Image (tube, grey):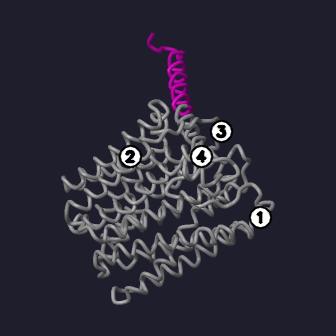
Amino acid sequence: MLKQQLRAISSLLTSITLIGICVGMTSTLLSLRATIENFGTLTTGIVMSAYFIGFLFGTTRAPKDIRRVGYIRAFGGLAALAAASILIQAIWIDPTVWFIMRFITGFAISAIFVIVESWLNTMADNKNRGTLLSVYLVLIYGGLVAGQLLLGVADPAGFMAFALVALLINLALIPILISVTVEPTTHEPKKVPIRSLIKLVPLGIFNAFIMQACYSMFYGIGPMYAIYIGLSITQVTLFMASFILGGMLAQAPIGLLSDRFDRRVIMAACAGLGAVMALVLSQLGASLVWLIYLCVGLFGACVLPLYSLGMAHTNDYLEKDQMIGATGAIIKVGGIGSIIGAPAVAALMQFGAVDYFFLLIMALSLMVCFYSLYRITRRARAEDQLSSSYAMLGPSQTSDELLTTLVDEHEYQAEQLAEAEQESQDNAAQKPGSPV
C-alpha cells in the first residue's frame, strides 16, 4: 500500500526535490555574489531578508489566489515567476533590483510549498501520513544539501549558476504539470490568534521567533562569514552543506527523545549545546577547515530541530482543532524573526565585528535554553504529551487546512477594518455641528 502511494506521489516528490535544490543553491549563491560585487554586509543582509518578507507575504496572500485559479495553474505560474526572478538577478547586479527579486522569489517559493504540501496531505491517510511526510522532508533536506554541493561546481561570479537554478525550477514544472492527481480540497479549522498563543504557550512563540532569526542569519550571512575567515568557494558550499546535513540526520533521533521526555528539557539541551558549538566556531579559522565542517555539522544537528521541537511543544497544549490555526500564527511569528535576523547580524558585521557572527547566534541560542528551563519551573509537563507527537518540519509547514486558515484570517481582518471605518464615520456624522 505504501509503495503504491509513494509511486502515486512520485511526481510531487520529484518536483519538490528539485525546488529544494534551488532553494539550497540560491541563498548561498546570492550571498557569495554580493560579496564578490562588494555590496557590503549591511546591504547584503537587507537584500537577503527580502526573501523572508516575500515568504511571509506569500503564506498570507498567495493562498487566496491559489484557491481562485487552481493548484496546477498556480504552480506553473509561480515556478515561472521564481525562475524569472533568479535570471533577472543575474542580468541586473544591483541591490535594489535584487531586493525586489528576492521578495518575488520568497513569495513564489512559499506558495509552491503550500501547493505541494496540500497536495501531499490530500493523498495521504492517517495510517501513513507520518511516513510520507518523513520521506518528503528527507527529500527537502537532501535537496538543500545537493544545492550547496552543486554550487561548488558553478562559479558564483558568472551567469551559469543562476541559469542552473532557473533550469532546475523549470524542470520541476514537468512532473507536477503532467500529474493526473485530483487537486486538494480545503476544510474549516479553528482560528488561534497570536496573542492567545503567547498567553497559552509563550515558549513556542519565543522559540519560533528566535530560531527563525538564527536560521536567516546563518543562511543569509553565513557564506559571507565563511569567506571572511578565509574559506574558498568550494569550502563555503561544504560549510553550508554540513550545517544542513547535520540537521537532517539529527531530526529523527531528537524527535524520538522529545516524545519520551519533557520537550522543554530536550529544547534546553539542544539550544545549550548549539550555543557551545557556536562559541567553538567563533574561534576557528580556515586552517582548521575539517574541524569547521565537523563543528558546523554538530551545530546544525543542535539548532535545526529546535523549530520542530517548539512546534510540537506548542501543540502539546492545544486542542486538535486549534493545531492548524496555531501553525499559521507560528509561521507569521517565525517569519518576522527571519526578516529581522539577517539585517541585524549584517549591521553588526558592517562595523567590523565579524568575529561576533557566531557569538550573536550563541547568545540567542542561550536565550532559548534559559527560557526553556525557566518554563519548566512555571508549568507542569503536558500530560503524557498526547496532544501531539514530534514531526520534522521543512522550510515551511503548510497544508490545505492552513491554507484556509490564512485566507479566512485575511478576510476577517479586512472585514474588521471595514466595520471600524464605518463605525468611525457614523460617530462623526452624529456629532453636533458635523457637516451633512
Q: Earlier in the sequence, mark 4 or mark 1?
A: 4
Q: Residue furthest top?
A: 436
In the picture of the structure, the residue carrying the numbered disc 2 is 174
In the picture of the structure, the residue carrying the numbered disc 4 is 121
Please state if 282 lies on the left or on the right of 329 as rendered: left
Q: Main secondary structure of the magenta part?
A: helix
* Front tag of 2 and 1: 2
Q: Do residues under tags 3 and 4 come within 8 Å of each other at their CB atoms?
A: no
Quadrant location, the C terminus: top left
Q: Where does residue 202 sit, x and y in percent of width and height?
A: 65, 57
Q: CA distance from mark 3 to mark 4?
A: 15 Å
- Element on which disc 2 rests: helix
Q: CA distance from mark 3 to mark 1?
A: 26 Å
In the picture of the structure, the residue carrying the numbered disc 3 is 189
Q: Where does residue 405 sit, x and y in percent of width and height?
A: 58, 39
At horizontal 52% and vertical 22% (from top left) the residue drawn is 422
Nearer to us in this view, 259 or 163: 163
Q: Which residues lie in the magenta part?
A: 412-436
**Label 4 crowd bin: few (<14), some (14–19), many (20+), radius 10 Å:** some
Q: Earlier in the sequence, mark 2 or mark 1?
A: 2
User: Which residue type does callout 3 highlight?
Assistant: Pro
Q: Which mark is residue 381?
A: 1
- Element on which disc 3 rests: loop
Q: Do residues under tags 3 and 1 come within 8 Å of each other at their CB atoms?
A: no
Q: Do residues under tags 2 and 1 come within 8 Å of each other at their CB atoms?
A: no
User: Which residue type does callout 2 highlight?
Assistant: Ile
Residue 428 lies in the magenta stretch: yes
Q: Is residue 31 above or below residue 366?
A: above
Please state if 152 lies on the left or on the right of 302 as rendered: left
